[in-house]
Amino acid sequence: MLSAFFCDGDDDIVAPSTRNARTTGPKIMSRTAVKSFMTALSHIYPDAESELIFRNTFELLVSVVLSAQATDKSVNKATKGLFEEAPDPRTMAALGEEGIARHIRTIGLWRAKAHNVALLCQQLLDRHQGEVPSDRASLEALPGVGRKTANVVLNVAFDQDTMAVDTHIFRLSNRTGLAPGKNVRVVEKELVARIPKKMLRPSHHWLILLGRYICKARSPECWHCPVTEWCLNPDKALTPPPTKKIR
């Protein structure tokens, strides 16, 4: 949700993808197929976890806030020095907006993110004794934190069965027929309802990895996708493109 300064990467960043998503193309995957789809992913990514680098819940929260419209790799590069200098809310609040900005200038929306992270740290101190809250309402009340960020923190740090729908998950949910929807909230609701409960928490990571590295936006690599058997995309590219000859 886009505040006066910055959105956390939730609806206002993901939702524009709906303009290009094929929400009417594939049929809706059956629940039996969904279970098989997710089971296959569980075997491919048995140890899947966030690609963000963090040592505690506070660093996870800051990293996810910074990851809006930025790659995990760029965030990890920026937070290495930031977390060394300010490993907790008190020291990061003391850095202030300019001190935080000094570390994160290489990532998108860095000015707004520095502003929000500084406010976020101060609110953690003022309202939560410097601890990251474990409930959605308190998380979403923090600057720069919306539903997707809250879902990631609740899922990863507090082992809750939440589904954070990013651009990758939104795209492949529509493309494959796993959980079609016109916006991220609809897709999230459908995923939570359709994925077997025991698979829901880790499935967030499985789907991100599938979307990031195989079911890519422009050139999905269907020919080596582990779940193409259940995918309902009518335009699956089942053969790799021809190798360009080097002259």
Image (cartoon, rainbow, N blue to C red):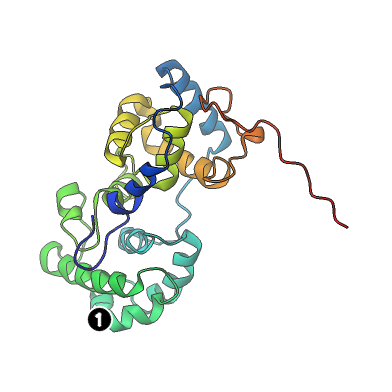
Quadrant where the N terminus is found in the figure: bottom left
Where in the figure is residue 204, as x and y percent of width and height? 41, 40
Pick the residue in front: 19 or 177. Answer: 19
Q: Is residue 80 above or below residue 209?
A: below
Q: How many marks?
A: 1
Q: Which residue is mark 1?
A: 96
Q: Is residue 31 left or right of residue 222?
A: left
Q: Quadrant of residue 9?
A: bottom left
Task: Please state, as top left, top right, bottom left or bottom right, where the C terminus lies in the image.
Answer: bottom right
| 114 over 199 or under it: above or below | below
Residue at position x 32%, y 46% in the image: 15
The residue nearer to you, when weighing 105 against 174, is 174
- Residue 99 location (% of width, % of height): 32, 83
Q: Tag 1: residue type?
A: Gly
Residue 179 figure quarter:
top left
- Give the x, y percent position of residue 19: 37, 43
Residue 57: where, in percent of width, then height? 32, 58
Any part of residue 47 in sight = no
Label 1 SS: helix
59 sits left or right of 231 in the view: left
Q: Against 166, is 128 above or below?
A: below
